[in-house]
Image (spheres, helix red, strand yellow):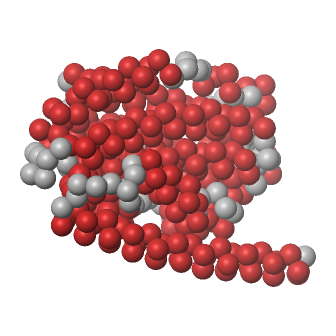
Amino acid sequence: MTTEPLSDLALLTELESVVESNLNRHLATAKEWFPHEYVPWSQGTDFDGVLGGQAWEPGQSKLPDVARTSLIVNLLTEDNLPSYHHEIATEFGRDGAWGTWVHRWTAEEGRHGIAIRDYLLATRAVDPVALERARMTHMSEGYTNAFSGVLPSISYVSFQELATRVAHRNTGRISGDPICDQLLARVAQDENLHMLFYRNLLTAAFELAPDAAMQAVLEVVKAFQMPGHGIDNFRRKSVQIAKAGIYDLRIHHDEVLQPVLRQLRIFERTGLSGDGEAAREELAEFLADLDRAANRFTEMRDKARARQESVA
């Protein structure tokens, strides 16, 4: 442990053995699975166009509108994988254990987009033309990591992987389709293992550079956004998703931020200097404000639901 700033290169070197041990743990834990096994192919029929099939109509989908919206957001987020790979490969490198992890993570994430798209098309849950146009638009924008440096990047993915797991899992639960629920539960298992990998790295980083790690956590928590925030109409879609209880401020605070922070022992750690302590105090204040905002949101949502139910 040091209070002196470590360069990104020094951090990558110091964390190499931690990456290797967690990579080995991940490979021993992760179970092989196949996207095609989770798709109800028998429900599929030809679309109009080259094959002269049936044109898509909204009534062909059995999913609730908000479940469809959430699935599309989740899929378009997964579709930007080439940009994510570029960002983490640039930040962490392509050599040694770091490089092996980067490529393994990319390969595992690639399954998610394949499986979700095949499910949506086989079940005619989405307009395939609109979906493809949205994919082209979103991927054409690319993705740039908002957090510069090794520690902020590790911090971000520690929270983001858990947030993605929660979003997938809750989308499956509200879909009303056991097949969709099963598929997204399987995707969520991958995301959970990815979160554990990055969280373990962040724990090790706290031992190496506690002040810088605390500052990185503060930076990420205060400015956190999901990687799909560049999707067209993301704000409107995220409001729909929040109102449905798939992913909202309460969930973000209780099921994403707090579990990671507890495992990192953020508020029990010793050995911080003035900068680290100041960052921890600011983090505590931010979390308190976020908790109050989450309470206000859930109260407003509950009142709106009550009004709708009384009218119905």
Quadrant of the rendered structure where residue 104 is? Answer: top left
In this picture, is 169 found above or below 21?
below
Quadrant of the rendered structure where residue 22 is? Answer: top left
Residue 120 position, x and y percent, is 66, 39
Residue 48 shows up from this direction:
no
Give the total of numbered labels: 0
**What residue lies at 72% left-to-right and 57% top-to-bottom?**
65
In this picture, is 265 found above or below 288?
above
The quadrant in which the N terminus is found is top left
**What residue lies at 69% left-to-right and 63% top-to-bottom?**
244
Nearer-the-camera pick, 248 or 231: 248
Residue 69 position, x and y percent, is 63, 55
**What residue lies at 44% left-to-right and 47% top-to-bottom?**
263
Residue 278 position, x and y percent, is 25, 69
Residue 66 position, x and y percent, is 69, 58
Drawn side of residue 118 relative to residue 83, left or right: right
**What residue lies at 58% left-to-right and 49% top-to-bottom?**
166
Residue 285 shows up from this direction:
yes
Drawn side of residue 117 relative to residue 283, left or right: right
Quadrant of the rendered structure where residue 37 is? Answer: top right
The quadrant in which the C terminus is found is bottom right
Nearer-the-camera pick, 115 or 207: 207
In this picture, is 24 found above or below 270?
above
